[in-house]
Image (cartoon, rainbow, N blue to C red):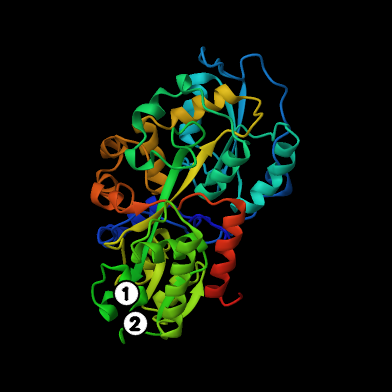
Amino acid sequence: MSDNETTRGLPAISRRQLLAGGTMAGFAAFLAACGTGGTATTEPSASESAAPTPASAEPSATASAEAAATPSTEVNWANWTYYIDVDANDQTKHPTLDKFTAKYGTKVNYQEVIEDNQNFFGTIKPALEAGQDTGWDVITLTDWMASKLVRLGWVEEFNLANMPNFTANIKDVYKGLAWDPEMKHHAPWQSGMTGIGYDPTVTGELTSLAAFFTPDPRWKGKTEYLTEMRDTIGLAMLYLGLDPTKPTRADADQAVAALQKAKKDGIVRDVKGNSYAEDLKSGDAVLAMAWSGDMVQALVDKPTLKFAVGSEGGMLWTDNSMIPKGAAHKGTAELLIDFYYQPEIAAEVEAYVNYICPVKGADEAMKALDPEIAKNPLIFPTDDILARLRVFGPLSEDDEAYFNEQFAKVLGVG
């Protein structure tokens, strides 16, 4: 989820454990991969939350455009919780990070300190404004925040000479975004989808976003929207035939008008964050704009639920690896990001986190680890599904304020 007002995290058990628990048959009915998994329940300690003390720059820390990087002795990576592979016998170890260290001799200071985009941004903004090292060499931020940092000039440009796996193996669906069309500032880490969550035993099979705007007695008064502006307005725009990759104020007006009309018509029960999944499980709601990861978890408790990407399309959100401006170990950060674009390494991560993988060939590599996961559309969506997904386009500061102001009407606070 491209969180704006809400916090994203994963449950304490991995989706690999859920798959091993016998839920694979139910997952196969889904059309998309994991979105959010709810709010993290474990907060890092004060020492964990702080960025590491900026190290003195090493002579080979930053690669030039002509020369490949010489690995530094350490590199600092800030990420979300439960977002990388973990040793089954030792939860403090990450096998792929150990492999990186074995290859390059670099210690990776990996910390799960990102609980939401806005708060983490607040921790690095003073250093970026002052032109100083934030203490992090790699940060992992969602599209809308990533685009903001690029717009502000606070992200290093990749030296792609250090990143041959990235350039060769990034999937086409991620290319050509308006805020970084040449992909010189961001590398997708994991993705999720926003679409239709529903109980077909009540609603029947649903394939169109039109259901969110149609006062059908089967779901009237039992439909819920999301509090995340980009997801809810994005789906409304797709329903209206508008392009959420290039959002305008006129689009916001049309989308909000359609959303408001649906509320007036009595279709909408509420506008919620992750708690909509509990309503789907209880039956208080039978249709909801949904994050697919929430639906994965809801399915465990209520197997009749389904998730679909609408025929008009769905929203794709991505958390991206980036190098903040002034990072002490830029060249090594590029090597680290590139390391995870090896299909066999990407597959090892996906076997634990089960998000949508952005790396070509990872599905084939996964067959050696777990053939069932390799066939799971939750992690490796079909080309047809990927072709229907859209990434919400960048907004200027003024336009962002306008969109939020209009969306406040849907939330009932504007």
- Kindly tell me whether residue 133 is visible in this rendering: yes
Question: For the residue labelled by badge 1, is the local secondary structure a helix, a strand or a loop?
Answer: helix
- Kindly tell me whether residue 82 is visible in this rendering: no
Query: Looking at the rendering, which quadrant does residue 412 occupy?
Result: bottom right
Q: Where residue 113 sits in the image (x, y, percent)?
A: 62, 46
Q: Which of the labelled discs sits on residue 66, or is there none?
A: none
Q: Quadrant of the C terminus?
A: bottom right
Mark 1 vs mark 2: give the one in front. 1
**Contact? badges 1 and 2 (CB < 8 Å):** yes
Circle 1 crowding by C-alpha within 10 Å: few under 14, some 14–19, many from 20: many
Residue type marked 2 = Trp
**Nearer to me, 106 or 157:** 157
At x 48%, y 38%, the residue is: 180
Q: In the shown orientation, is residue 111 left or right of residue 370?
A: right
Question: For the residue labelled by badge 2, is the local secondary structure a helix, a strand or a loop?
Answer: loop
**Nearer to me, 337 or 125:** 125
- Read off the residue under disc 1: 211
- Read off the residue under disc 2: 219
Residue type marked 1 = Ala
